[in-house]
Image (cartoon, rainbow, N blue to C red):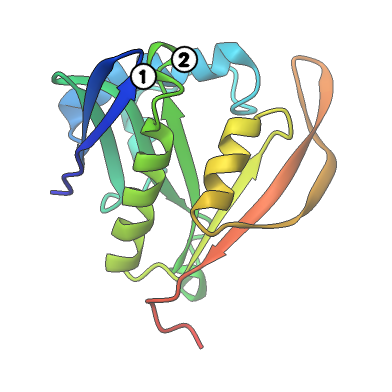
Amino acid sequence: MVHVTQRKENNNIIVAISVELMSPADWPAVREIYAEGIAGGNATFETSVPDWESWTASKRADCRLVARHDGEVVGFAVLSPISKRAVYAGVAEVTVYVASKAQGAGIGSKLLGALVEASEKAGVWTLTASIFPENEASLHIHRKHGFQTLGRRIRIAQLRDKWRDTILMERRSHRVDWE
């Protein structure tokens, strides 16, 4: 279990956040946070939340984290394999979501930092992220945690009948031996 506590002044209130391994019991809260991200229009090309079985089948079992505040799940971070081919076993795509009511308190950064650590313990040597350019907070925290911009994918796909670009980012591990 990963455990990180953050104490941050936020309008004179101390906010304590723990980052822990996700369990199936966390799915209702994770599903709600994911649905918020979908509704916001700047987090994913997905337009609906899948059921638990579909969602979990597409994620790495060893790199699923939730952030809690007072026992309540307020964010999550997971890795998805980019391919089923063995040569790409150490390459994964990052997903980080924070509940709208908890944004701006550093939770996304804590989740991403803990996910990077968990990924390296699991032998992942490359993390990728595909982020809408309008999602400046996500771009910022990814840069903060060592992701570099590889390029902009112009009109890569449509969301709600509108072509959208994404920024393709990558982080190479300095701990996992990939050379």
Asked whether residue 35 is in view, the answer is: yes
Identify the element where label 1 is drawn: helix
- Name which residue lies at 27% across and 49% down: 61
Q: Which of 82 and 147 is in front in this view?
A: 147
Q: Are marks 2 and 1 in contact (CB under 8 Å)?
A: yes
Q: Nearer the viewer, residue 32 or 102?
A: 102
Looking at the image, residue 20 sits to the left or right of residue 53; the answer is left
Looking at the picture, how far across and down is residue 122, in whole percent? 29, 65
Q: Nearer the viewer, residue 41 or 134?
A: 134
Q: Which amino acid does label 2 sit on?
A: Ala
Q: What residue type is labelled 1?
A: Arg
Looking at the picture, how far across and down is residue 50, in whole percent? 44, 23
Q: Nearer the viewer, residue 95 or 135?
A: 135
Mark 2 surroundings within 10 Å by alpha-carbon count, few (fewer than 14), some (14 through 19), many (20 or more): some
- Name which residue lies at 32% across and 59% down: 117
Label 2 sits on residue = 35
